[in-house]
């Protein structure tokens, strides 16, 4: 309880009388002596003027069983357990000390003396479960009676469960430790924090690590630290462990391992393995399995536990094994060379050995080939250079083969060929222009320029497409270069080794030899013609055309631009004649040469001609200038270039335009004037023709109008006649129609009334028949019901009569005939016997209210007395207690 609360309670308690309940206490300060004393209830305390209650009333502290509390600065007690006081009456305290108080046997509460402070309230004792412990640390030196040893400040030890820990002031609880459960194929790795003796009795130095593999719960000691839980590695026939020693030690198999040594543990050694603290897992090694068609070569193999550096070992399948530490495979697992009849393998010797297969001694550097069909596994002294396969070649296919010993290159064409060990494929290099032209169509792309393509957008797009196609198809440089020469074309091939050219006419397939190259043609192109614009491998023999633009000047200095188109072809009579065929390629650029020659002839002819004459006779002047005149002064039909037998057959003048602007304007004005004159004359003729046609149309229109009016009068006359006839028919027809309609109306009404009456009678008949049928059915149903009801009633009465009869019969049979007779005669017999007992012959009993006819009564009596034997009739009537007896003769 705080001092603030105590002061407030003291102020609120203004009375000097304090009633202290049981098990409560107060602290009273004597202001004269400054001594605080303890007052314990139950009592009534009267405070003096020099006294002050500084605490209380407060409840005493009760410590239940299995609880404790901590009191700071406890009082000093003597051997008898009594509190010691000084000469002033103040309780002696052990300042800055702690006192742990447990439950007393009588569980009596205790007060706090002045100066004592409750450091820790009542707290349950710590229960340490099984497989757990408290790590304790001594804060003061003391003698441990439980362990019977002396503890020094700083010592640590364990308090293991199951048990209840009773705290001490000399000991602090550092932490609670739980046991580590070690499962099967598990171990815990421990580390010593100082020199100790472990649970197995072995001495451990500071920092030493070891494993505990015993299955179960393990509780580490105070100076042991659990580093980790190690799981066992399961070893199978497919996995092994490669380990490395961190220091020299003896492993679990009793073998001494040196520091840095590596070894392999397989399933043959153990099923599971837990790494020791001095073992490091390098890798999990997978098994290497070879089938019957596989092999491998091990580099630096291990033999008898020692690694043979620099050696190789050949392993053949079928086999499974693990690579030892330091071993590695050369090129991994390799397949056995299975060679077909058209296959072979090139081998190279890297180490001298005896070839048992060929019974030959092989020296390093030797090369040889093994041909199929066979299986081959190369030994470790042999290097496989390459694997060869026979190349099937058609009669139009081939390859370039070079002998690596002599360097000679040859072409193999039209056969199935396999390279030998001294041969290799040779790649034939061609110029880039030739490579591009091999992929293009000589006919379709003959007019597409190969240079200066930026001038024409369409041409650039076409060339882009062509280049993309050529780039997409890569030529195999080792295959024979072939070129299809189109029809009516030729190709020149030059052999640089034989220094000889050959010309091949199409259609033909050209195959280049190793030392042959195509003759590349570079022709003029575009309009006007520019040199080196079109490149081609083949020369087209025509017929074809080319277009050119030339500028000429007339005698009166009028400059004109002519666009001309020429038809041409090459004239060759015998393609087998090499000299005549060689003329075709004698002019490298026949297009440019022909265009220049023709332009020169035209310029020379036009230079001596006036503009007006040339304008009127341009075609004849140009044809005469190009083709020339024969002996009869007639224009020839063709023009031949004797150098290459090029023949021009016709010239098409496509356009003639003045180059000078003034000439062009004058020519345009004259043309416009001629057009205007022609237009005016045509306009006047058109007007005259239009006027004539207008007059004719007016006459025809008038005649047609008169004719139409006459026809209209005739039609009007017919209309009036028809209208009169229609009116007469209408007047008579209306009356007739009204009479007929009235008669028809009366007839319809009569027929409707008759039909209505007939239908009404029919409806009445149907209703009557329906009612009759209903009544008939109702009567029949009622009669049937009554009949059945009567039958049921009759049956019921018959059954009841039968039951009554049987009942009466059974009653009579059960009572008996004599009994019934006795019952029937019991009354008269009783009366007779009564009268006989009384001695009376006759008796009349009446109630006095009912009159009695006494006429003849006496006679009767007398008759009875005289003994007349007449027939007697007796009647006994009992009505509401009236009895009458009559006797009649």
Image (cartoon, rainbow, N blue to C red):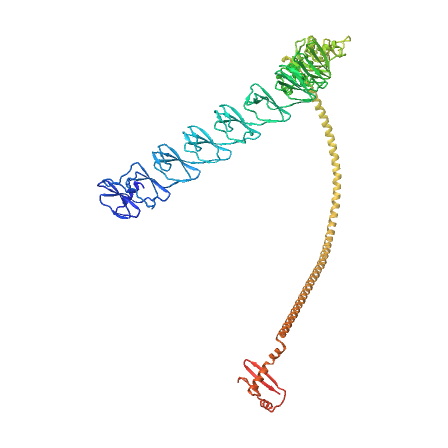
Residue 322 seen in render: yes
Residue at 72%, 24% in the rendered image: 689
In which image quadrant can residue 679 be found? top right
Q: Quadrant of the N terminus?
A: top left
Q: How many marks?
A: 0
Residue furthest out toward the right? 632
Q: Is residue 179 above or below residue 261?
A: below
Q: Position of residue 304 (x, y in %)?
A: 56, 23
Task: Please state if 509 lies on the left or on the right of 234 as rendered.
Answer: right
Q: Nearer the viewer, residue 468 or 356?
A: 356
Q: Quadrant of residue 486?
A: top right
Please indicate, yes or no, whether residue 526 appears anywhere in the rendered image: no
- Horizontal and vertical percent for residue 205? 42, 28
Residue placed most toward the observer, 348 or 206: 206
Tell me residue 779's x, y (percent): 68, 65
Task: Locate residue 637, reporting x and y percent.
Answer: 75, 12
Query: Foreground residue, 811 or 312?
Result: 312
Residue 415 falls in which quadrant of the image? top right
Quadrant, the C terminus = bottom right
Viewer-proximal residue, 355 or 616?
355
């Amino acid at each position: 309880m705080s001092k603030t609360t105590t002061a407030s309670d003291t102020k609120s308690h203004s009375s000097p009388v304090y009633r202290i309940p049981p098990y409560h206490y107060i602290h009273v300060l004597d202001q004269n002596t400054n001594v605080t004393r303890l007052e314990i209830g139950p009592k009534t305390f009267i405070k003096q003027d020099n006294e002050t209650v500084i605490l209380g009333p407060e409840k005493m502290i009760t410590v239940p069983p299995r609880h404790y509390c901590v009191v700071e600065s406890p009082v000093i007690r003597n051997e008898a357990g009594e509190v010691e006081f000084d000469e002033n009456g103040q309780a002696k305290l052990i300042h800055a000390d702690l006192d742990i108080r447990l439950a007393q046997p009588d569980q009596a509460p205790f007060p706090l003396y002045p100066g004592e402070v409750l450091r820790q309230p009542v707290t349950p004792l710590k229960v340490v479960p099984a497989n757990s412990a408290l790590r304790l640390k001594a804060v003061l030196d003391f003698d441990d009676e439980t362990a019977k040893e002396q503890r020094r400040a700083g010592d640590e030890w364990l308090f293991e469960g199951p048990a209840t820990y009773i705290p001490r002031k000399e000991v602090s609880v550092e932490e609670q430790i739980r046991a580590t459960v070690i499962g099967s194929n598990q171990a815990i790795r421990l580390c010593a924090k100082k020199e100790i003796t472990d649970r197995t009795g072995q001495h451990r130095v500071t920092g030493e690590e070891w494993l505990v593999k015993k299955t179960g719960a393990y509780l580490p000691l105070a100076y042991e630290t659990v580093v980790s839980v190690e799981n066992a590695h399961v070893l199978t026939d497919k996995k092994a462990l490669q380990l490395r020693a961190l220091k020299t030690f003896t492993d679990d198999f009793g073998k001494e391992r040196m520091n840095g040594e590596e070894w392999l543990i397989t399933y043959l050694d153990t099923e599971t393995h837990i790494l020791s603290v001095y073992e490091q897992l390098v890798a999990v090694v997978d098994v290497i399995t070879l089938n019957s068609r596989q092999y491998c070569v091990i580099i630096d193999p291990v033999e008898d536990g020692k690694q043979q550096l620099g050696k190789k070992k050949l392993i053949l399948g079928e086999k499974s094994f693990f690579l030892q530490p330091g071993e590695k495979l050369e090129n991994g697992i390799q397949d056995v060379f299975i060679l077909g009849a058209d296959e072979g393998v090139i081998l190279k010797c890297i180490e001298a050995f005896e070839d048992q297969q060929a019974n030959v001694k092989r020296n390093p550097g030797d090369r040889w080939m093994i041909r199929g069909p066979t299986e081959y596994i190369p030994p470790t002294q042999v290097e496989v250079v390459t694997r060869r396969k026979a190349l099937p070649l058609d009669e139009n296919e081939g390859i370039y083969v070079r002998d690596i010993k002599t360097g000679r290159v040859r072409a193999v064409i039209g056969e199935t060929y396999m390279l030998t060990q001294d041969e290799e494929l040779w790649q034939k290099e061609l110029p880039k222009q030739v490579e591009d032209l091999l992929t293009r169509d000589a006919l379709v792309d003959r007019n597409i320029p190969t240079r200066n393509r930026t001038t024409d957008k369409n041409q650039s797009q076409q060339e882009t497409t062509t280049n993309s196609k050529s780039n997409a198809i890569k030529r195999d440089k080792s295959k024979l270069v072939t070129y299809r020469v189109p029809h009516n074309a030729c190709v020149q091939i030059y052999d640089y080794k034989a220094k000889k050219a050959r010309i091949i006419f199409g259609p033909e397939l050209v195959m280049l030899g190793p030392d042959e190259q195509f003759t590349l043609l570079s022709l003029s192109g575009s309009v006007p013609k520019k040199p080196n614009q079109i490149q081609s491998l083949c020369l087209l023999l025509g017929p074809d055309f080319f277009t050119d633009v030339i500028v000429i000047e007339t005698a009166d200095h009028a400059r004109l631009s002519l666009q001309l188109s020429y038809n041409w072809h090459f004239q060759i009579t015998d393609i087998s004649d090499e000299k005549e065929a060689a003329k075709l390629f004698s002019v490298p650029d026949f297009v440019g040469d022909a265009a220049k020659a023709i332009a020169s002839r035209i310029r020379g002819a036009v230079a001596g001609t006036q503009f007006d004459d040339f304008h009127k006779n341009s075609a004849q002047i140009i044809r005469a200038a190009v083709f020339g005149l024969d002996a009869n002064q007639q224009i020839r039909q063709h023009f031949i270039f004797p150098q290459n037998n090029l023949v021009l057959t016709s010239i098409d003048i496509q356009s003639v335009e003045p180059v000078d602007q003034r000439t062009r304007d004058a020519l345009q004005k004259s043309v416009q004037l001629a057009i205007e004159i022609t237009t005016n004359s045509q306009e006047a003729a058109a007007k005259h023709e239009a006027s004539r046609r207008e007059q004719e149309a007016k006459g025809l229109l008038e005649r047609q109008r008169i004719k139409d009016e006459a026809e209209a009068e005739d039609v009007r006359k017919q209309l009036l006649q028809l209208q009169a006839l229609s009116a007469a028919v209408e007047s008579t027809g209306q009356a007739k129609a009204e009479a007929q309609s009235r008669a028809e109306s009366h007839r319809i009404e009569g027929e409707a009334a008759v039909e209505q009456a007939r239908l009404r009678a029919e409806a009445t008949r149907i209703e009557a028949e329906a009612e009759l049928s209903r009544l008939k059915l109702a009567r029949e149903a009622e009669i049937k019901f009554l009949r059945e009801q009567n039958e049921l009633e009759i049956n019921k009465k018959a059954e009841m009569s039968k039951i009554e009869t049987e009942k009466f019969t059974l009653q009579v049979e059960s009572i008996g005939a004599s009994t019934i007779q006795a019952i029937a005669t019991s009354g008269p017999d009783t009366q007779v016997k009564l009268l006989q007992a009384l001695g009376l012959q006759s008796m009349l009993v009446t109630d006095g209210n009912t009159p009695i006819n006494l006429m003849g009564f006496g006679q009767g009596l007398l008759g009875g007395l005289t003994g007349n034997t007449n027939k007697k009739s007796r009647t006994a009537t009992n009505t509401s207690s009236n009895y009458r007896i009559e006797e009649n003769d």
